[in-house]
Structure formats: C-alpha cells, structure tokens
Amino acid sequence: MSTPVGTRRSFVKWVTGLSSAFIGLSLAIPLIGYVISPALTRRKASWMPVEKVENLPVNEPKDLDYAVTTQDGYLETRQTKAVWALKHPDQTVTVFSPICPHLGCGYHWDSQDRRFKCPCHGSVYDMNGKVLGGPAPRPLDVLPSKIENGELLVIYKEFKSGLSTKVEL
Ligand code: FES
C-alpha cells in the first residue's frame, strides 16, 4: 500500500519522465526532419547547355552527349546524358529523350530510312517522334528545351516506360 510520501514520489517521477520525453521529442523531431528531408526531396533538374544551335543540321536528328550534375539528397553525382535534337527549318529545336517509351531501350536514327528505330522490339518512329510501327505505346518523349544566346539548353527527365501517357519518374 502506498503512503502519501510514496504517492508524491511516484507522481514527481511520472511528471519528470513525461517532461523528459516531451523535451526529447521536441528536440528529436526537428533534428530527424533536418537529417532525412534532403533524402525525400525530389531530384532537382536544371537547364544544361547541350550544343550551339548553329552546329545542328536542319531536318537531321543529331545525338548529343553532355555532362549533368545531379543533386540527390546529400549526393551530388556527375553523369553523361544523351539526347536527340532535331532542328527544324524555322530554327526551332525539338529535343527527344534517348529512351524508347516501350520498355526503355536506346534507339537510333536510321538516316537511310529517315526513321528512328528501336532494336529491342522493333518500334519505329518518324523524325518528329510519331509512332509508325511496333509496340511503342506513345510517341518519343520530348524534353523541355530552350535556346539562349544561340545555345540549346535542355532539362533532362525520365518517364515511365510502357504507358500511353508521359509520367515523369
Ligand atoms: S524497348 Fe523499344 S521497342 Fe521495346
């Protein structure tokens, strides 16, 4: 049986424990948030210079390699990316992702047939990315691009393959 002193003592212990837990949690929650939030942040893509527009041939897709630095949480990685760029007669440029929308293989430009062809399952696209044949569920994925001071800038993105609509990864 507890005495009034025992009851008071256990009450003080209980309040002290509760206060300690409260202080601990109020310190831990912001700290945990600070530590894990970069890992939960979506990769930041930025405009990257790819090529001088004057170096692109008109009506002839050209594959371009360029270096990309990606910030993913705390990790900064540098990779080489490739895109297909098509300069139109009016000097505008369309940039395609190099990944086939069917199941993600790399495709190439057949300059004889003037078509993009994917070697994996035989999808065929015209110069503007429209599907001409094969199992591809959608046209080639167009990437955001712009021209500044004669330079072609691109934001590299990837999309889910096998879908009829573009869904960014
Ligand atoms: S991955 Fe290109 S046709 Fe299947």
Image: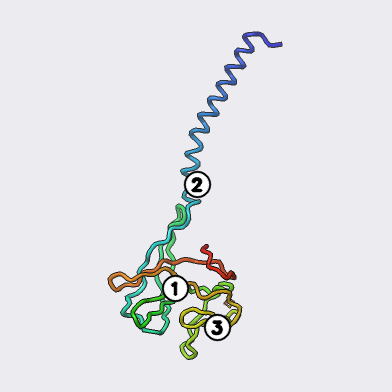
Residue receiving disc 2: 36
Residue receiving disc 1: 82
Please report whichever mark, 3 or 2, sits nearer to the chain's N-terminal start: 2
Answer above or below: position of 31 versus 122: above
Q: How many neighbours does mark 2 have within 10 angstroms: few (below 14), some (14-19), or many (20 or more)?
A: few
Residue in the image at 46% along x and 53% along y:
73
Ligand 1 - quadrant of the structure image: bottom right
Q: Residue furthest left?
A: 149
Residue in the image at 36% along x and 77% along y:
92
Residue in the image at 57% along x and 24% along y:
17
User: At which x and y percent is residue 47?
Assistant: 37, 64
Answer above or below: position of 62 versus 113: above
Task: Return the residue nearer the eye: 116 or 69.
Answer: 116
Residue in the image at 56% along x and 20% along y:
15
Q: Can you tell which of label 3 and label 2 is closer to the viewer?
A: 3
Residue receiving disc 3: 132
User: Which residue type carries mark 1?
Assistant: Ala
- How far apart marks 3 and 2 lie (CA) works out to 46 Å
User: Which residue type carries mark 3?
Assistant: Leu
Q: Is mark 2 within 8 Å of ligand 1?
A: no
Answer above or below: position of 104 versus 45: below
Q: How many neighbours does mark 3 have within 10 angstroms: few (below 14), some (14-19), or many (20 or more)?
A: some
Answer above or below: position of 133 versus 159: below
Task: Return the residue nearer the eye: 79 or 23.
Answer: 23
